[in-house]
Image (cartoon, rainbow, N blue to C red):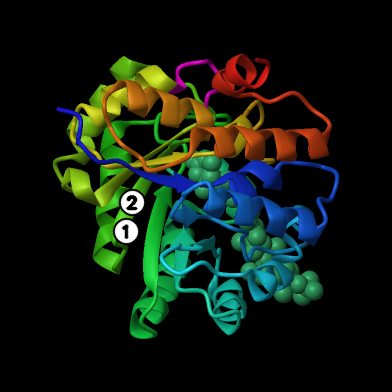
């Protein structure tokens, strides 16, 4: 049964922008985050503290976090790949960090330059330190269905990593279909396995819409009682180390979809559509959100 309340965790300013080759100025990023908060989004992944040699687009993370006008009640989490990133993020007074091992060796090597096992050791150091410092820690597992390098991934592998992340102190684990190859069937098989080690309120769904399966995968997942969904404004997104990965499920499409299910998100769809237009216009590309296209053209 689908939960009556769903938490939307916006990843546009991070997952959405990290794949953009042209540098987006810090003030545009800040304006995007402010507009998302004004539309009613309560969780906004605002940047990441990764190596600027790897992801140049996120190289202004200190400026983003230091200049952000934080709205009370809004959470501004940031991914960190190692203790170095963690300490820089902590200096910026972040309240929540995210750690992000992969479900596959191939993607782990390309994205983090180490094996899954090594990455889990590194992420554990971050999680232990963050919990000690009183910060919240979110976990991601990427490539939960398939990997661009290793092919299909067994649900058992994902369940094991999810369990490790929860043991490290993560309050929730977001299951990422990084390249969007999942279908409602493979998502159901995955969740049956993962729910052996985690209750639905400890999980989030992070779907990329590469194959157009985002919303049907989401419904399949929500029927297990999961209450948090990651999405990206205007359907921006992708990971530079996942060949063929396109955008995340669009936040506008998600809000419209949830409205149809009778789930109140307290998000202003009109403001969201304007925000999607704002960032897509800046990037000089059409929105990837079908709802934005349909409603925005009226
Ligand atoms: P490495 O090159 O092995 O690391 O990268 P290193 O320790 O050898 O450091 C290399 C240089 O980077 C050094 O500088 C470090 O100081 C610096 P130098 O001495 O050469 O001048 N450095 C840093 N600087 C700032 N902040 C840091 C940091 N770390 C090192 N945190 C590393 C290993 C993990 C750092 C690198 O591979 C990395 O940053 N990877 C992150 C890649 C990334 O951000 N990918 C996208 C996010 S994942 C995703 O999108 C999937 C997700 O959305 C879920 C889904 O869709 O399924 C989450
Ligand atoms: Mg992603």
- Secondary structure predominantly adopted by residues drawn in magenta: loop
Q: Give the number of the disc on residue 173.
A: 2
**From the viewer's perspective, is residue 68 above or below residue 255?**
below
Local crowd size for mark 2, using a 10 Å CA cut-off: few (<14), some (14–19), many (≥20): many
**From the viewer's perspective, is residue 94 above or below residue 194?**
below
Instruction: Count the marks.
Output: 2
Query: Where in the figure is residue 174, as x and y percent of width and height?
Result: 37, 46
**From the viewer's perspective, is residue 211 above or below residue 170?**
above
Residue in the foreground of this view, choosing between 114 and 30:
30
Who's the residue at 37% across and 17% down the image?
216
Residue in the foreground of this view, choosing between 90 and 191:
90
Who's the residue at 53% across and 24% down the image?
209
Q: Which residues are magenta?
A: 208-214
Who's the residue at 69% across and 47% down the image?
18
Distance from the alpha carbon under mark 2 to that under mark 1: 7 Å
Q: Is disc 2 placed on a helix, strand or loop?
A: strand
Q: Quick check: can you spot residue 100? A: no
- Left or right, residue 131 beside residue 176: left
Residue in the foreground of this view, choosing between 79 and 226:
226
> What residue sits right under mark 1 in the picture?
165
């Amino acid at each position: 049964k689908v939960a009556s309340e769903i938490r939307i965790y916006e990843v546009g300013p991070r997952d959405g922008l990290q794949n953009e080759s042209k540098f987006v100025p810090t003030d545009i990023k800040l304006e995007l985050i402010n507009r998302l908060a004004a539309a009613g989004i309560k969780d906004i992944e605002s940047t990441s503290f990764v190596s600027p040699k790897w992801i140049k687009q996120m190289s202004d993370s200190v400026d983003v976090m230091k200049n952000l006008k934080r709205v009370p009640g809004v959470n501004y989490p940031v991914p960190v790949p190692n203790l170095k990133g963690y300490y820089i993020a902590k200096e910026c007074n972040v309240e929540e960090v995210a750690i992000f091992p992969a479900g596959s060796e191939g993607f782990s090597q390309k994205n983090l330059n180490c094996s899954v096992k090594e990455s889990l050791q590194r992420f554990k150091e971050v999680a232990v330190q963050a919990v000690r410092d009183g910060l919240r820690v979110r976990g991601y597992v990427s490539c939960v269905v398939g990997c661009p390098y290793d092919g299909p991934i067994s649900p058992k592998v994902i369940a094991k990593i999810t369990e490790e992340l929860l043991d490290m102190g993560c309050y929730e684990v977001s299951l990422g279909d990084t390249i969007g190859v999942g279908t409602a069937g493979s998502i159901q098989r995955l969740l049956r396995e993962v729910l052996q080690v985690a209750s639905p309120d400890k999980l989030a769904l992070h779907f990329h819409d590469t194959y157009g399966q985002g919303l049907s995968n989401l419904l399949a997942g929500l029927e297990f009682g999961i209450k948090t969904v990651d999405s990206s404004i205007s359907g921006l997104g992708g990971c530079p180390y996942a060949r063929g990965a396109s955008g995340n499920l669009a936040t506008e499409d998600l809000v419209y979809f949830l409205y149809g299910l009778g789930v109140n998100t307290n998000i202003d769809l009109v403001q969201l559509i304007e925000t999607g237009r704002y960032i897509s216009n800046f990037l000089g590309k059409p929105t990837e959100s079908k709802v934005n296209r349909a409603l925005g053209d009226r």
